[in-house]
Image: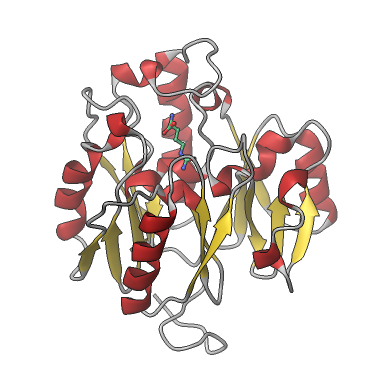
Amino acid sequence: MAKHSSYAAGMTSPYAFTHALCRAPAPSAVSGIRANGGPDPDFTGLTAEHAAYVGALRELGLAVEVLEPLDDFPDALFTEDVALTFPEGAILLRPGAPSRAGEVAHIREALSARHATLLELTGPGHVDGGDVLRLADRVIIGLSDRTDRAGATELAALLERLGYRAQIAVTPAGVLHFKTGCSLIDESTILAVPAMRDCPEFAGLEVVLTPTGEEGAANILRVRDTVLIGARWLATQAMLAARGVPFRPLPTDQIARIDAGLSCMSLRW
Ligand code: CIR
């Protein structure tokens, strides 16, 4: 990946990705974890959403590999939560949901074939990748029901070994993952739900709030010059259009039934 001259040593653009690693949904995905109950997703629809997502990443120029489904792990299609990937190497995480712990062994195999440097969280703490937001100059680790302080502290030290400075932040109650509630629009602009407006770690950045009723839009995914956004978030799309940000709507109704958004379905580097 080309490095941009304005970045500190070891740092690269947070969204100039060249590669992504996804995992096809298994039929068991319809039983994925959801915090507030609600109906199962439709498997055909879920598969179509996943395929549209993979297709979009490829059209944006990424080399995307799609791993085999894991029927023993309903949430395994959300590869983002079990590892972190950077041009400098990868870090295996320890997801906070007990039913997801076994996913790590499977992603280990895939990542060790693709990254020369593979670090690992050894515990006892936990971190979900959905709680990790990479900015241009640092990485924010949000404490949540899935990510505890012991895990975040251990991860901060591992990130330092790869050349990344980390900050530990707090995810508001009721927000599953830090990135469920905020994402990068560009290197100096964050899209956030109102509950995250005053996050101290956003000082110096412009924070744009999700329009009323569109809190679910906050999990956008910036890939190179384009923002991927859930198709039903029309007011948020209008806001991006007004700001001149190129975006691409993708269907997310079925994955939303199991508490997921657009960042969750890939590891990117
Ligand atoms: C879970 O609760 O773990 C899955 N049903 C959803 C994971 C979403 N991942 C993410 O926000 N990074």
The answer to whether residue 256 is above or below residue 153 is above
- Residue drawn at x 37%, y 52% is 267
The answer to whether residue 50 is above or below residue 245 is above
Q: Is residue 114 left or right of residue 180?
A: left
Q: Is residue 91 or residue 26 the one in the foreground? A: 91
Q: Is residue 38 left or right of residue 23?
A: right
Q: Is residue 210 left or right of residue 130?
A: right
The answer to whether residue 184 is above or below residue 5 is above
Q: Residue 244 location, x and y as percent?
A: 79, 59
- Residue drawn at x 66%, y 44% is 218
Q: How is the image coloured?
A: secondary structure
Name the quadrant of the C terminus. bottom left
Residue furthest top as drawn: 39
Q: Is residue 5 or residue 128 the one in the foreground? A: 128
Q: Is residue 42 or residue 140 the one in the foreground? A: 140
The answer to whether residue 27 is above or below residue 243 is above
Q: Is residue 31 left or right of residue 230?
A: left
Q: Residue 242 location, x and y as percent?
A: 85, 53
**Location of ligand 1 given as a quarter of the image:** top left
- Residue drawn at x 18%, y 42% is 106
Name the quadrant of the N terminus. bottom left
Image quadrant assignment for residue 74: top left
| Residue 193 visible in rendering | no
